[in-house]
Amino acid sequence: MSGEMAFVSCTVNSVTQEFHVRPEEMLIDVLRDRLALTGTKLSCDLGACGACTVLLDGKPVSSCATFAWQTDGMNVRTVEGLAAANGALDPVQQAFIENSAFQCGYCTPGMIMLARALLDRDPSPDRETIRVWMGANICRCTGYEMIIEAVEKAALIPLETGK
Amino acid sequence: MNEMSANLDVVGHDTVRKDAVPKTTGAATYTVDVSFPGMLHAKVLRSPHAHARVTSIDASKVRGMPGVHAVVTRDDLDGLNPTYGYFIKDQPIVAMDKVRYIGDTVAAVAAETELQAVAALEQITVGYKILPTVATVEEAMAETAPELFEEEPMGVVPAYGQGASGARRLGRNNCYRFSYETGDEAAFDRCDHIFEDRFVFSRDQHFHLEPFVTVARMDGDVIEIWSSTQNPFPLRKELARVFQYPENRIRVRVPYLGAGYGAKNNCKTEPIAILLARLSGKPVRFCMTTEENFLTQSQHAAILDVKTGVMADGTFVARSGHILLDSGAYSDASPLVAEKAGYRLPGPYNWQHLNIDCDCILTNTTPAGPYRGFGGTQASWASESQVDIIARALGRDPLDLRMQNVKNLGEAYVPGESGIDSDLRAGLKVVADRVGYEARSRGDGRGMGVSIGFKDAGGVNKPSQARIRITTTGGVYLECGAIEIGQGIHTAMSQIVAELLNTQLDRVVYPELNTDYTPFEQGTNASSAIIGTAQAVQQAALVAKQKVLEFAARELDCGIDEIELDDWSIRKGNDAHPLAPMIMGYYGGTGYEFTGAGFFKPELDHAAPLESQCVSWEFGWGAAEVEVDRETGLIRLLQLVVSGDAGRAINPLVCRGQDEGSAVMGLTGVLFPCMVYDGAILMNGNGLDYRVPLATDIPDGFVSILQEQGHGPGPFGSKSIGEGCMLPVASAIANAVEDAIGVRIRELPLTPERVLAAIDEACG
Ligand code: FES
Ligand code: FES
C-alpha cells in the first residue's frame, strides 16, 4: 500500500523530531498519532476548513493537506507550542480567552494559529485585514465577530519574548 | 441594557469560560482524541445506488485480510433489534432487504488501520436490483411512486393533547403527519382578504467540524462508548433496545463536543462501533469523514403552503397551512420536526382559527433530522414572509402590522398553552431602531425588512435531574447531563451554582458526563438547558445549601435564620465560622460530603396541545438592510441586526456568541446553495464544494443586541438563547429585498437567478 519510507527531520514546537514516514502520510497524522499533539484537529481533510492549521516556518498551512515529508528541515508550530517558555499564554490565546472567541472549540486551535501568523507579519492589522485573513478558516459556531475582535485585542497585548 | 435585578456576584458577569484554557491550548479532549492501545478503525461500505434491493452480500474474501478483525453485514445481526429511530424504528444498522439512498450503510469493517479497512471494503461484493428512485417530495408523493417501505415499520404515534394529533402512512411515502387545529373554520368566511402563498425552504447540512465519531470497547460485560452525542441517556436506551442489553451495562461517556447543531442526537456511529468492538474484542473507533457526515444527516427541505385571512384593518383572523418536509430516506426525527414546524407555523400572533398539517415525506436522499431551529426555521421563513406580503397588499407598514397583531406578554400562545414570556413589541423596536427602520431611505435598490423568529423552547415533557455534592473543604461537584457542545453551559451552570451557594466560581467543577454516575438528562437540545436542566441544578444547589445550614445551625446552637453561608464559612452576626473544622468535628477527620438532588419536568397536561405546556418561548428579532443590483440580481447585505431575549443573561458575552453564531448559521440557507442534488445524487457533499459563511461574508453592519427582559422561567429569570437569532434571518432579508425592489421571493436560497426571475416576472 505504500512505497519507500522517507526520512524526515523537523522541529516541532522547538523540539527536533525524526521520523520515517510513508509517502502518503500527512503532517496531521504525524502530529496527532505519533506525537500525541491532538490539539490540531482534523475536519474536512481537504484543505478547506482550516481546523488543522499549523505554522510551517511561520506560514499557516493545512496540516491535512501537507505531506509529512514536506516538513523536512522545517519548523512546525502547533497550538501546544504557542505558550512562552515560562508558560505565559500567547497574546492570541489570552485574547481568545478574555473575549470568549470560541464555542465548541474545534476550530479554535486552527483559528489561533492563523491569527498568530497574521500578527507575526502584521503586528497591528486593521479590522478589514483581520476579516480577510481570518476568512481562510471556517468556524460554524461563533459568527466570527468575536474572533475578529479577539485578534484586534491580541494585537494590543505585548508578546512575551524569549521563547 | 442590563439595568435589572439585584446585585449578583457571579451571575450576569462576563466571567471567563471554564473551558477557555483547554480549548485555546489544545488540551481539550474530544471524542476524536480518545484512543486506546490496539484500537481498531472502522469504515463502512456505502450504497452507490439511491434505491435498490440487496440481492446478495459476500464478505468472505474480507475475513483474513491483513489487519482485518471484524466484518459486519446483514448476516451478522443475529440476536439484535437491528433497526433504530426516534418514534419509528426504520433505519437498519446495515442494509437488510434494501438500500434507500446513495450512502446508505451496507457493511462495516474494523481493521488495524483505516487504509486496511478501506481496502477490505473493496473486497465485499454486493448484488443490487435497482429500483425506481424518488428524489423529491413531489416525486415521492406521486400516485405511481415506489414506496421506500412496502410494509409499515414498527413505530408509535405519541400522545397529544388539545387540538393536536399525529398519524402514520396517510399516503405514498408519507411517514408521519402532525396536525393541529383550533377555533372555528368559519372564521375564514368573515375575513376581508385571504392570502395564499407557497414558500420553499432550502436544505442545509449542519457542517459540525467534529465529525460523527464513537470509540467503543467492552469493559468486562459492560459496553463502554465515548461518543460525540447530544443525548447520551436516550442513546443508551436505544442501544439497550438494539443490542438487547441491560441499560446499566451500557456506559456512555461524552467528552467535549465539536458542535452538533442538532445532528448529534440518537444513533449515528454508535451501533456499528459497538458491534465491531464486540465481534473483534478490541476497542474500535468509528470516525466519519466530512463526506460521510453529508450522507448521514441534514436539515429538512420544506414546501410550505400558507393561507391567511385578515380583516381590512389588518387584524389577523385565521391561518391554515400545509407543510411538506423532505425527510430523506428514514424517518429519524421527522415526526418531531413535523410537530414543531406545524405547531410553530402560526407565529406569535393572535388567531381565531388555525388548521395546520405537516407531512413528512420519505425520499431517496440523506436522512433529515434535528437541526438548530427544529422546524421553527422553516415555519418562521414562511410565516414572517407572508406577514410582509399581507402588509404590502393592505398598504400597511410591515413593522406596524406586526405591532398590531403580536401576542401580548403573558398571553397564551394557543388555548391550553403557556403564556408568551417576552415583550414582542419591545423586542421588535430594539432591532428596528438599531437598523434605522423608520428613517430608512429607499430607492437606489436599497431597502429594509424586519422579522420575528419564533419557537417554543425546552422540548416536550422533558425531564432533567441534577446533583450537587460539596466536599468538606467546600469544593462543589455540579453533576447534571447538560453537555458542553459549545454553548457555554458548563460555565453558566457553574455560575448559577456559585451564586446560589455564595461561593467562588472556581470552587465549582463540572465532571465529564458518564451515564454510570451523571444524573439523568433527556438531552442537550431544544434550547432546554438553561430553562430545564438549570432548574434541576438550582433545586439541587438549594437542597444542599439547606443541609449545610441546618448542620451549622445545630453545631452553633442557633436558628437557621441567624446564619448565612459565605464562601464555605458560616457568618453569624459579625463572626465567621469556617465550615471545614465544624464538619470534621462532627463527622470525623476524614470529612463528609453534603449532597442535594434536583429534578425538573413540566407537568403533563392534556389541555396543552403537546401534552405539556411549553416551558418557554424563544425569540430572535431580526432586521436587515440590503442593496439589490437589478442588473445582476446580486443581494448585498448591508446590515443584519439580530436580538435575542436572554431573560437574565447568566454570562452576557456567551449569550452574544449564541446570538451571532445562530444568525450567521441562518445566513447559510439564504445566501448559499445548501445541499444541491442532481436527482438523488448529492453534488456538493464535501468540505470544499459546500459553502458555509466565512468571516468575509459577514457585513460590517452585523450587530447583535442582547435583551434581558427578565421574564424567563430559568434561574434568575433566564431564558434560552441558542436558536432564536437563526430564525428571523431569511425572512428579514427577503422582506428587505421586497422593500428595496418591490419583488417577493418565496424560495430559498435567495440566489441572483431567483432575484432576476422575480424581477422579470414583476415587469411582465
Ligand atoms: S481539516 Fe485540514 S483544512 Fe479542513
Ligand atoms: S467554535 Fe465551533 S467551529 Fe468554531
Image (cartoon, rainbow, N blue to C red):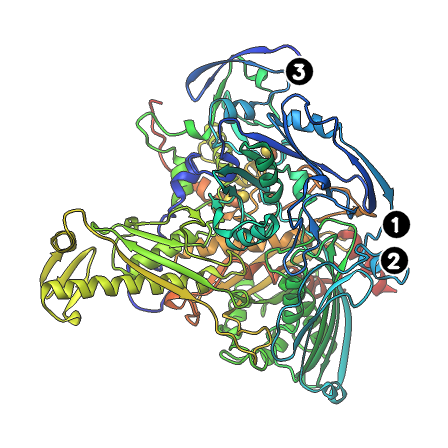
Residue B130 screen position, x and y as percent: 87, 44
Label 3 crowd bin: few (<14), some (14–19), many (20+), radius 10 Å: few
B269 to B531, vertically: above or below: above
Chain at numbered mark 1: B
Residue B661 screen position, x and y as percent: 54, 52
Discs 2, 1 touching: Cβ within 8 Å: yes
Residue B748 screen position, x and y as percent: 73, 57
B293 to A42, vertically: above or below: below
Q: Is residue A15 left or right of residue B462?
A: left
What residue sits right under mark 2 in the picture? Answer: B145
Residue B336 screen position, x and y as percent: 63, 63
Q: Which mark is residue B104?
A: none
What residue sits right under mark 1 in the picture? Answer: B132
Q: Is residue B518 left or right of residue B444?
A: left
B316 to B18, vertically: above or below: below
Q: Please, what is the three-letter code of the amino acid marked with disc 2?
A: Ala
